[in-house]
Amino acid sequence: MKRKYWLGLATTLLLAACGNGAETDSAGDTTGSTGSSESAVIGGNFELSGGASAYGTPMDQAVKLAVNLMNDSGGVLGEDVTYVSYDNTSTPSEAASIATRLATEDKVSAIIGPATTGDANAQTPALTRAKVPAILPAATGDSVTMQEGESVLEYIFRVCFQDSFQGEVLANFAQNDLSADKAVILWDNSTDYGLGLADAFKNVFTGEIVAEENFTVGDTDFQAILTNIRSKDFDVLFIPGYYEEAGLLIKQAREMGIDQPILGPDGFANTTLVELASAGNVNDVYYTGHFTPNSENQNVKDFLAAYEDEYGTDADSFAALAYDAANLLFEAIEAAGTTDPEAVTEAIANTTDFEGVTGTFSLDENHNPVKDTYVIELQNGEEVGNTVVSPK
């Protein structure tokens, strides 16, 4: 099921000719599109280069796959869907600029992305002014759908759980499933993600936090902070951060003889973590996941097969979240009966019992999904089991 992205290729060549090499413009298979006023155009604002590209690239690919499959089955409102996406280079300023472009120049009905909380927050003012909705696949920051924590942002939605929820889940898992009484936290102090997760864990964990150390995105040598904790008495090590640093932390910790169980958030959910750590070091590692490829659900199996057929690689949880975001958007446009962004916004807000590959869920009054999560266990770098946790 290989396809050529003719529209994307043509546009990319045009942009290259104009000297705008920083942008990537891609589209789904638009063969057969009539170009009527009600044919849906959706946007992608993703990290296709830069530090978060390992998250944004599979998301962009998953949205393209969802568009292709939807068009193969007849499209939305009887018309083919067109997908236009750009590379925000993993920078908030570019994410904001692209949101403006998609909303005002490409006239999209809605945007999917960005991947990270910082980039997602940066696009919010532009979308609020343009009154165009966005569905965020993986921006887990608690406040991303809220205005100063008090009122919901009308045009911002997401399909992933929040940091406070995954911090709570991991603290409870440490206490109840690992019988941990003492914890060490090594957290990323350069992102809201690391700070929010560390705070959420500490708010719930009733045992003793015997030490806290921190690091910064881009750090590669953790010998000093690991030396500080190696002699301490603790039961579990919590690392609220992304896979780039966490992979190296796991490798160096295990090589220094630190063998306590390691807990992490959804930022661990990338195969690069195991590559950086080496599979033999990734034992007794547990992280919160939005998705498991070991599900017996037929929708999950079909998605995994289609993704592997299209791209020749396995889909990860970020691809799964973006795939759900795209299909939720298709359902909303059908429910609205129009591609008008404000009508689509209202239809997204009214989503109930959506059946996705990351679970069946409804959106609550704050535009967050109400759904289960997984605590995934890794041994020798492979998923060997998971614990399903439902929201209270």
Image (spheres, helix red, strand yellow):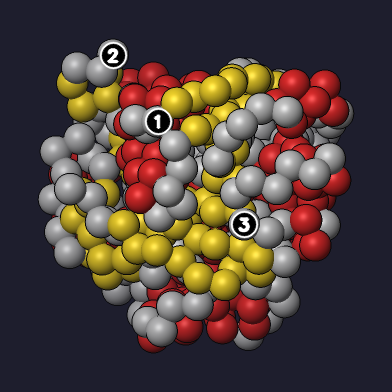
Query: Pointer 2: what residue?
Result: 148
Identified at 36% across, 56% down, the residue is 373
Figure check: 363 above or below 52: below
Crowd band around label 2 with a 10 angstrom C-alpha radius: few (<14), some (14–19), many (20+):
few
User: Mark 1 falls on what kind of element?
Assistant: loop
- Name the one closer to the observer, 185 or 320: 185
Judge left or right: residue 139 versus residue 379: left
Identified at 28% across, 13% down, the residue is 148
Query: Pointer 3: what residue?
Result: 284
Q: Is residue 118 visible?
A: no
User: Mark 2 falls on what kind of element?
Assistant: loop
Q: Which image quarter holds the N terminus?
A: bottom right
Judge left or right: residue 117 versus residue 218: left
> Which tag is nearer the camera, tag 1 or tag 2?
1
Residue 360's x, y, as percent?
26, 66
Residue type highlighted by circle 1: Gly
